[in-house]
Image (cartoon, helix red, strand yellow):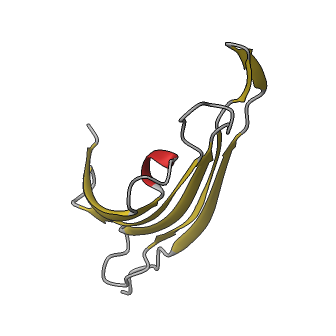
Amino acid sequence: MERPQLRRFGVYLAVLLLHEQQHLQLKLRDPEFVAGGWVGKGVIRSRPFDAVVVGLSNANWSRAIPNGPIWESVLKLGNQVMLGNSASIQPNLQYVFNPMGQGKVDDALVLGLQMNIAF
């Protein structure tokens, strides 16, 4: 008997927009944050419960903040590997554009590992 295919795909979008506020005689805009991406489960036929994630996020701050950050963006690629029914590991690769938001630090390549255990 053939195993059913469990391929599923989805997209996500998150937006955070806050109001302006008066602070220390400056009119500041709270940070704006936008993130979106794609998630594919069962992309690799031999690993039907694993997921691939590709995402992009961007944060913008008020230019009225003295010496403050202006913008930062992150491109992320991850692969969630299921280890049975209740555990997974997710190595990920992130490229950070304009780290710290001020243009003073070179773009950064970041390697990460996330572990999940459900009980």
63, above or below 81, in the image: above
Question: Quadrant of the image for the C terminus?
Answer: top left
Quadrant of res 106: bottom left
Side (left or right) of 72 relative to 77: right
In the rendered view, tell whether residue 83 sits above or below residue 52. Answer: above
Residue 113, quarter of the rendered image? bottom left
Please report the residue visible at 53 percent of the width from the left and 35 percent of the height from the top.
Answer: 67
Residue 22 figure quarter: top right
Q: Is residue 15 left or right of residue 53?
A: right
| Residue sitting nearer the eye, 90 or 61 | 61
The quadrant in which the N terminus is found is: bottom left
Percent coordinates x, y for residue 35 in the rendering: 60, 53
Residue 5 coordinates in the image, percent (x, y): 46, 79
Residue at 51% over, 48% down:
101
Q: Residue furthest top?
A: 24
In-front residue for pair 73/76:
73
Count of numbered tags: 0
Position of residue 3 measured from the top left corner of the image (x, y, whole percent): 38, 81
**3 left or right of 35 in image:** left
**42 up-or-down from 22: above or below:** below
Residue at the image point whose x is 37% and y is 82% from the top = 44
Residue 66 coordinates in the image, percent (x, y) = 59, 31
Q: In the depicted view, which residue is nearer to us: 97 or 87?
A: 97
| Residue appearing at x 26%, y 57% in the figure | 112
Residue 32 in the image: above or below residue 91? above
